[in-house]
């Protein structure tokens, strides 16, 4: 007895086609189309494991922390090109640097204007209390960038990609 090469049904000798599927008995088995073979070979090879966000965060934690202290180090090292985690924190550190610079300039201009207003034409004793109060408030406002740096470092050290308050939505590095 012969066996159908297409479906595997046993067929009596001399029968020209399979009673189940109708395929010719003497014909060669049906071959797969040429496009299916490379697909099967690619499928049989184990896929390379992509780096998970947790692995990326662990591997680039130092660069992410450095982005808040010296924002240009990850830029020079190119870490922002290879790691989404480092890119996120490098962007946050760069935005924070730009914000700190602008914030410092504005606070110093406000301090200079208030200083010229308060010390021009008034007696020393009257304006001293007002000036010391305003100067204290301006000095405390100067701590805002430092607080943002601490928040950024804590997020980077914890492996989180959390935006900074106030300025986190801005994108400088794309």
Image (cartoon, grey):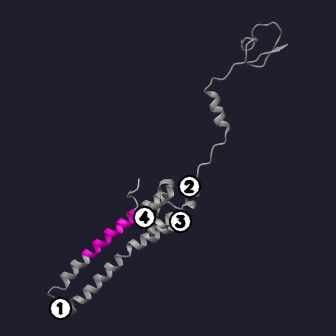
Q: Are marks 4 and 2 in contact (CB under 8 Å)?
A: no
Residue 101 seen in the current view: yes
* Residue 41 found in image quarter: top right
- Please identify the residue farthest to the right as the structure is shown: 1
Q: Which residue is mark 1?
A: 123
Q: Nearer the viewer, mark 4 or mark 3?
A: 4
Q: Which residue is mark 2?
A: 53
Q: Secondary structure at mark 2?
A: helix
Q: Residue at x 63, y 43 (%)?
A: 47
Query: Of the residues under marks 4 and 3, which one precedes in the sequence?
Result: 3
Residue 164 seen in the current view: no
Query: Of the residues under marks 1 and 3, which one precedes in the sequence?
Result: 3
Query: Of the residues under marks 2 and 1, which one precedes in the sequence?
Result: 2
Q: Are marks 2 and 1 in contact (CB under 8 Å)?
A: no
Distance of label 2 from label 1 (alpha carbons): 62 Å
Q: Which residue is mark 4?
A: 72
Q: Which residue is mark 3?
A: 62
């Amino acid at each position: 007895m012969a066996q159908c090469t297409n479906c595997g049904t046993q067929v009596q000798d001399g029968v020209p086609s399979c009673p189940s599927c109708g395929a010719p008995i003497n014909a060669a088995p049906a071959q797969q189309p040429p496009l299916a073979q490379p697909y099967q070979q690619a499928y049989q090879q184990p896929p390379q494991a992509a780096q998970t966000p947790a692995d990326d965060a662990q591997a680039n934690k130092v660069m992410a922390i450095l982005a808040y202290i010296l924002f240009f180090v990850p830029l020079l090292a190119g870490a922002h090109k290879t790691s989404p985690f480092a890119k996120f924190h490098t962007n946050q550190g760069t935005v924070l640097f730009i914000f700190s610079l602008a914030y410092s300039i504005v606070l110093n201009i406000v301090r200079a204007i208030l200083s010229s207003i308060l010390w021009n034409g008034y007696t020393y004793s009257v304006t001293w209390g007002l000036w010391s109060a305003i100067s204290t408030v301006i000095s405390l406002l100067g701590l805002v960038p430092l607080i943002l740096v601490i928040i950024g470092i804590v997020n980077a050290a914890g492996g989180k990609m959390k935006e900074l308050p106030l300025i986190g939505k801005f994108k400088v590095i794309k």
